[in-house]
Each structure stands twice: as structure tokens, then as C-alpha cells.
Image (cartoon, rainbow, N blue to C red):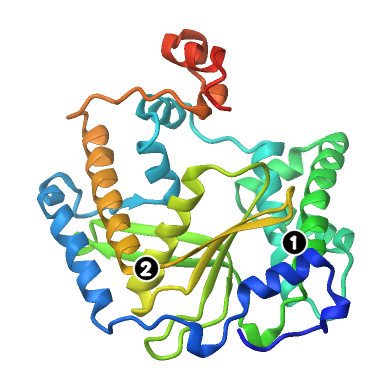
Amino acid sequence: MTDVGPSRTELNPAQQEILDLLGAPIEARPTFDAGLRDELRAELESGVAHLAPDLDPDEAFFVSKHKLSSVHGCEVRMLADEAAGFEWSIPTARGTVAHKAVELSVHWKGEPTPSELVDESLGRLTNGGDGLAEFLQRCTEVDLVELRGEVLDRVTKFVESFPPLQARWRPVTESRARVELAGGRLVLSGKVDLSLGQARGTTAGKVLIDLKTGGFAPSHLDDLRFYALLETLRIGVPPRLVASYYLDAGVAHPEAITVPMLQSTVARIVDGIERLVGLAHGTVAPALRPGPSCRWCLLLADCEAGRQFTAEGGWD
């Protein structure tokens, strides 16, 4: 991304910081070996080969950033959440609605207001045919007002914080990636919030961004490294940069992508898959690991380790 849109005088300081972060001349961008993709895939395949007999040949075992983050956290909590199942609610719906509004903002001609983006997003998702549509259709007027207000806050912060995204930057929202391993029995899948730029030959140029509310968590770095690996396996060239952007604070946490980082991500994924498969088959006992997420755990009332962690303020 060397081209810029508005002049510097038209951007507020937060927008200018993002523009400075994303822009880089060609000579400052890293170049990677053309064989990197094959090397990383070989490491992954070798690491999971011994699990093939435990995998269903007719139904792929899906591994996402959320599953990896969960299994590397408290496995007891992960299994409890899986047993409880997923239900749409105002907190779970607001992220999806906000991301849809951001997607519309990228491709909308003209300069829509955040309110227009949120209303259009809600309208489209309500008229869909999935579980979220059913939830939105059942919501009371008060629930919808609450949801709209929370989404409007997020979308307004995005519009205020990001410079207008130019078409020549190749912006893509909700960009999906999929990697099949073990003859299709294992599938790594991910969906990054915002992708900008492109690789040129073996020179990195793409930037992957995850939009966050709240504060920084170490798992956010792991999520983005997972996305970076999927991107590398997909096209053979890593992204130049990954970043979590914290809307509430108006700051980005960027990280440049390196080969050692991708190799460590492969090791993390292999370890995570081994635990996930073992837990799914009941061949390993779930590990109890108290952490910041204890505050939201379904089992907190009966978990002595979790209660002690939260009582000691372990999340600070």
C-alpha cells in the first residue's frame, strides 16, 4: 500500500496512525523463499500424521482459531462450553452485525453514516435464513434498540479511526481461508476481519487486521499468527503485517511476520490438534488451567481453582 487517499490534513490523528502503519514502500517489504509454503505444509502433515487412524475419513475434523485458543487455555471450560451449545444473544450477535456493517462501509459508494450502515446490516441479517435471522426476528423492540446502540458504537469508532479505504488497497472483509490436511480429514479454517494489500511475486504486501473491543489479550496474537499461516499456505507468501485494532482505545497492536514465527505457529497448531483429537475421543483427561476467562466460565461456582484465581484478581 503505497497509494494514499485523503490528504494528511483531512485525516484525524488516529486515522493518520493507521495510514502510517499500513503504508510501506516496496523496498521496505520482506521477500520470502518460494518453497516456504511447501516446507510449512510438510511440517504440518508430518506433525499430524500419527492422528490419521483416529480421524473419520468421511467427516472432516475442523480446527479454528477459537478451538485452538480454547484447547491451549482451560480444557475443562472448553468441554463445558461445547456441552452447553451455542445460543444467539445480544452479546454474541453484536459482533456479527458490526462486521456486516463494516463490510458494507468498505464497498458502499458515497459516504454513508454509521446509522445507515447499522440499519442496513440489521435489515439484511434479519432477512437471512440462518440462526441469527431467527434470533433477530424473535427479538423484542427493546432488545433491538439495545443491539443497535451497541453496534452503532462499534461502527462509529471504526469510521472515526480508519482512513477511508481505497479500492486500490484491495480491501476485503470477512476473508476466509481453508487448509486441508491428512487427505482432507483435518481442516484448518479461519476468517479475518479485514485484509488490505497484496503480495507481489514473493514479496509480502498484505496486511491482516482483526477488529477488537475491550483490551489486549495474548491470545489475540496467536489468532493473527494462525491467520498468517493460513494465508501463507494458501498463496505461498506470508502477509507483511498482522494487527489487532482495539476500537475502544483507538490503537493497533501490529506484528511483522517472520519464518520462525510461522514455524512456531505450526508447532502450536500440531499440539492443539493432538489435544483436540484426544479430548474428542476421550483418550486424554482435560487439563484445568485457571485464567482470565474464569470470570465467564459456566463451572466457576463449583471450581475451586477458578474461584481462587478470580478472588486473587488473577486477571489483572
Q: Is residue 122 left or right of residue 173?
A: right
Q: Report x, y in % for residue 157.
A: 79, 56
Query: Which residue sits at x=71%, y=68%?
Result: 17
Residue 233 image position (x, y, % from top left):
33, 71
Marking on residue 258: 2
Q: Label 2: how many residues lie within 10 Å, few (<14), some (14-19) or many (20+)? A: some
- What residue is shown at x 79% (from left), y 42% (from top)? 147
Query: Is residue 43 shown left or right of residue 157?
Result: left
- Alpha-carbon distance for marks 1 and 2? 32 Å
Q: Which amino acid type is marked by label 1?
A: Ala
Between 58 and 284, the residue placed more toward the observer is 284
Question: How far across and down, in percent of the image, does residue 61 sit?
Answer: 29, 50
Residue drawn at point x = 60 percent, y = 51 percent: 130
Quadrant assignment for the C terminus: top right
In the rendered view, tell whether residue 64 sits above or below residue 230. Answer: above
- Is 166 above or below relative to 80? below
Neighbour tally class for label 1: few under 14, some 14-19, many 20 plus, Cα within 10 Å:
many
Q: Is residue 295 visible?
A: yes
Note whether residue 133 is visible. no
Q: Identify the residue position indicated by label 1 in the image.
A: 101
